[in-house]
Image (cartoon, rainbow, N blue to C red):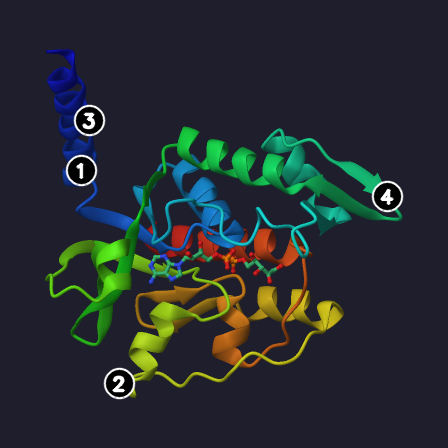
Amino acid sequence: MRDVLISRLIVERYFEKLRNSLELDVAIVGAGPSGLTAAYELAKNGFKVAVFEERNTPGGGIWGGGMMFNEIVLEKELENFLKEVEIEYEVKEDHIVVDSVHFASGLLYRATKAGAIVFNNVSVEDVAVQNGRVCGVVVNWGPTVRLGLHVDPITVKASFVVDGTGHPANVVSLLAKRGLVEMKTEFPMDADEAEKFVVDNTGEIFPGLLVSGMAVCAVHGGPRMGPIFGGMILSGQKVARIVSERLR
Ligand code: 48F
């Protein structure tokens, strides 16, 4: 019966992938633009990296563009990056405009092709902390967490963890509610300020835990922004650079 062969192929490959990912250089939480960019850069440089995404569809806020008009805008300085990852774009009025479906799928393709493993439907519900340092992520099925089922999670070891969970900064908030870090709140919309703020404040917030993308604004009290994504890419690149230097 071929159905059983199909099941076996899936189960064997998935569990091999999972077993090989139980000890990572970097665990990235959230497959939004900053997390995927960081995953791409780190995997490209030979680090063992996995992205944990609680939803079925990795890509975070990219797909919907602005108010579901599925186009996004980036700063012109991102042209070289888009060329490198072979994403098609148009330059208009000194900005880059990209089809958001093309952008999300292109980024995902590049990150996974470089060797990053994306575990979708897997939620990070806690972090592991030992000797005052974050040393892994505590994971469970996304639907299990959403339904509040009483099922214990499993732990994945990582030399560094990146909170790329966007506006709620879900990983940092786990430490904030225990009083281990201080967390501010996101400020009202200001795209001019926000892009720079995100990049400037991307970095380590607690030993072993770094923050990238919109989570930076929630953690450090920066303004929100609309469907302009240059800051997300630059933040993902910066977090990858910091982690790479520390791992070397
Ligand atoms: O929000 P998101 O796209 O993160 P980002 O990289 O980019 C922000 C922009 O999309 C946009 C913006 C900038 O222009 O304002 O919002 O900062 O993606 C975050 C991803 O993290 C997942 C969530 O489902 C989303 O796909 N996520 C959130 N919490 C968890 C998680 C969790 N606890 N475990 C796993 N994934």
Q: Amino acid at mark 4?
A: Lys
Q: Mark 1 or mark 3: name the one nearer the start of the chain.
A: 3
Q: Can you say whether 64 is above or below 201 in the image?
A: above
Which comes before the other along the chain, label 4 or label 2?
4
In the picture, which quadrant includes the N terminus? top left
Q: Kindly report the distance in space between the C-alpha atoms of the residues bearing marks 3 and 4.
A: 45 Å
Report helix, strand or loop for mark 3: helix
User: Ligand 1: does it lie within 8 Å of the C-beta at label 3?
Assistant: no
Instruction: Say whether disc 3 or disc 2 marks the residue closer to the N-terminus.
Output: 3
Residue at image mark 1: 20
Counting labels gives 4
**Numbered label attached to residue 92:** 4
Task: Kindly identify the amino acid type of the residue bearing the numbered disc 1.
Answer: Asn
State the residue position of label 2.
178
Marks 1 & 2, CB-CB < 8 Å contact: no
Residue highlighted by disc 3: 10
**C-alpha span from label 1 to label 3:** 15 Å
Q: Residue at x 10, y 62 (%)?
A: 152
